[in-house]
Image (spheres, grey):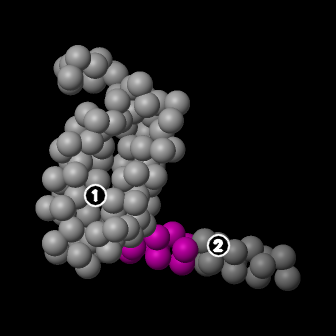
Amino acid sequence: MKNYELTFLVHPDYEMNLDEVVEKVKKLISTNDGKVTKEVNEGKKRLAYAIKGQEYAVYYYMEVELPATAPAKISSVMNITDEVLRYLLVVTDERRIKMEEKKREYRANRAAAAEKSETQEEE
């Protein structure tokens, strides 16, 4: 299983029914033996240029784990989905993931050290 980033633009007419669109995408991922590890609704934004006559879209971002055959299947379905104006599915850079893990570990160690020094000062 590889890590991927999926960003898609939802048609503004589906803004009120965004949960249904997101569930449709999640179901597409799960039927292809993938799983969503992170998701972020980035909100409605103005597009740099009109796509299918629309000036605005709802941006949605997901981090997913997929087997090797899944991206092609997901792309073929996303291409014909009316609710999605555009999408981008790319492989996550493994170096970035490792760097984020190191940052989290460093912050946790600093927080633990700070807490330890506070308890020593109180004594």
Residue 38 drawn above or below residue 15: below
Q: Type of residue at label 2?
A: Ala
For label 1, the residue is 5
Q: Main secondary structure of the magenta part?
A: helix
* Frontmost residue, 7 versus 116: 7
* Frontmost residue, 19 versus 60: 19
Q: Earlier in the sequence, mark 2 or mark 1?
A: 1
Cβ–Cβ below 8 Å for labels 2 and 1?
Answer: no
Q: Type of residue at label 1?
A: Glu
Q: Nearer the viewer, mark 2 or mark 1?
A: 1
Quarter of the image that includes the C terminus: bottom right
Q: Is residue 3 left or right of residue 58?
A: left
Q: Residue at x 22, y 58 (%)?
A: 74
Considering the numbered disc 2 on the image, is that residue within a helix, a strand or a loop?
helix
Q: Is residue 114 left or right of residue 76?
A: right
* Frontmost residue, 50 versus 79: 79
Give the magenta range.
Answer: 99-110
Asked if the magenta segment contains residue 17, the reply would be no
Considering the numbered disc 1 on the image, is that residue within a helix, a strand or a loop?
strand
For label 2, the residue is 114
